[in-house]
Amino acid sequence: MVGSDTTRKPASGFYYGWVILLVSWMLMFFTAGLSQAFGIFLKPMTEDFGWDRSSFALAMSLFAIVSALVPPFAGRLADRYGPRLVLTVGALLNGIGMILMAFTSSLWYAYLIYGGVIGLGFGVAGQSTNAALLARWFVKRRGMALSVSSTGLGMGQLVLLPLATLLIINFSWRISFIVIGSMSLVMVPICFFVLRRPEPPDGHHEADDSVAVSELPETACLAAELIRRDTQAAFRSRAFWLLIGGFMGCGFTIYLLMTHVAALATDRGISATQAGTALGLVGGTSLVSGVIVGSLSDRIGRKHLLAGLYLLRAASVVVLMGAHSTEALYLFAVMFGLSRANGALVSAAVIDLYGRRAVGSILGYTTMFHQLAAALGAFAGGLAYDLTGSYNLALAPCVVLLLAGSAASLMIDERRPSASRRLQPAPA
């Protein structure tokens, strides 16, 4: 029976989608070394060169802007030609960019390499392209797959951020960049040789009654038009903009926090090692949240969990504003880490609402709005510190944005728009 446990498995008895999920997880693992480790380097580099924090944080803002503009185009390429080459190129840019950062001697160079090269690589091989990859392989277990993939980001933080800190303390920030970049280059051959075209989703050869008609194969001549129309339909949807509103608040806060929390902690007398451990703890707790929240969302829906995660993150920011001890910093890290599963929920909600056909394009735009807000958050933190000597001026708006995102999430209508309208060809 269609959609039942009796559906046939591939002849080998092994579903290759699990290999794809592992590759996706590994990509997210090394992504942590690119997008989350910047704050580890902020204080040692600004002290070495005498830069103010807002000027150097602008490199992260440029990274966010470039990685915001790229995903819609990368997603469109992934929709049309598959994610293998897209992800391979992104992994190559990421690794080379991190190694090149070791040779930084001026702000413009940091802007060019971190903002340009690494930002381009992250935009090409980031979470939206990963989600598009997994959407081709998983339907019923989509939330689980996306959340498991996102735990790679948490594990990357747990491993790479403390490692980067130790390398800086014992050697130099230049050596740290070289080591992290060299490690991430392992993804280039893995993406190129391991990724392949999907089998039937979830390992089922028969159609699943949970798969909309709009997700059935189309002729090549209709594919581009239908992808364009699905993307336009998302932009006309109220649910899409409610998701975007909350996700922009997420982007603003997460880049502000991950860029500046290590410097904030050491400013308050907490050691660099403890600050790095706290950032690793963010990753460790996000592993737990990712697995639990993803599987739970497949059963009860996305929006209530999403609203709860935004509330939890708002509370974590309040804790950070008053954190002057290692214990308080670790409490913030646990709360913040548990809130990090929201990205996978947003991706799953987008796929639930608009299908898999244009998923790369739609998630690309979703990431674009997130990263544009992230660019503002990274710079706002540095500017607040340079103006006042404290980060609280920038942290307070984070609480407001996250509360608004929680309210917006509760207003989302999770019913999927009719697929039949999207299947009809445009009038001649």
Image (tube, rainbow, N blue to C red):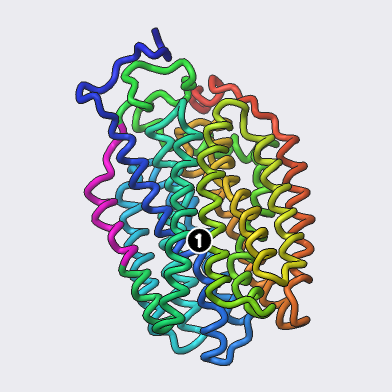
Residue displayed at 69% across by 52% down: 313
- Picture coordinates of residue 196, whole percent (x, y): 27, 40
Relative to the observer, which residue lies in front, 89 or 188?
188
- Picture coordinates of residue 285, whole percent (x, y): 55, 51
Residue displayed at 57% across by 25% down: 299
Relative to the observer, which residue lies in front, 160 or 277?
277
Relative to the observer, which residue lies in front, 18 or 362?
18
Q: Is the magenta stretch mostly helix, strand or loop?
A: helix
Residue 305, by quadrant, is top right
Stretch in magenta? 183-198
Residue displayed at 52% across by 56% down: 283
Q: How crowded is mark 1: few (under 14 residues within 10 Å), some or many (20 or more)?
A: many
Residue 100 sits inside the magenta stretch? no
Residue displayed at 55% across by 29% down: 298
Callout 1 secondary element: helix
Residue tagged 1: 67
- Picture coordinates of residue 177, whole percent (x, y): 40, 75
In the rendered view, does 264 fall on the left or right side of 403? Answer: left
Residue 185 sits inside the magenta stretch? yes
Q: Which residue lies furthest to the top in this view?
A: 1
- Picture coordinates of residue 17, whole percent (x, y): 33, 35
Relative to the observer, which residue lies in front, 369 or 349?
349
In this rendering, the answer to whether 93 lies above or below 285 is below
The amino acid type found where label 1 is placed reads Ser
In the rendered view, does 90 fall on the left or right side of 322? Answer: left
Q: Quarter of the image for the N terminus: give it.
A: top left
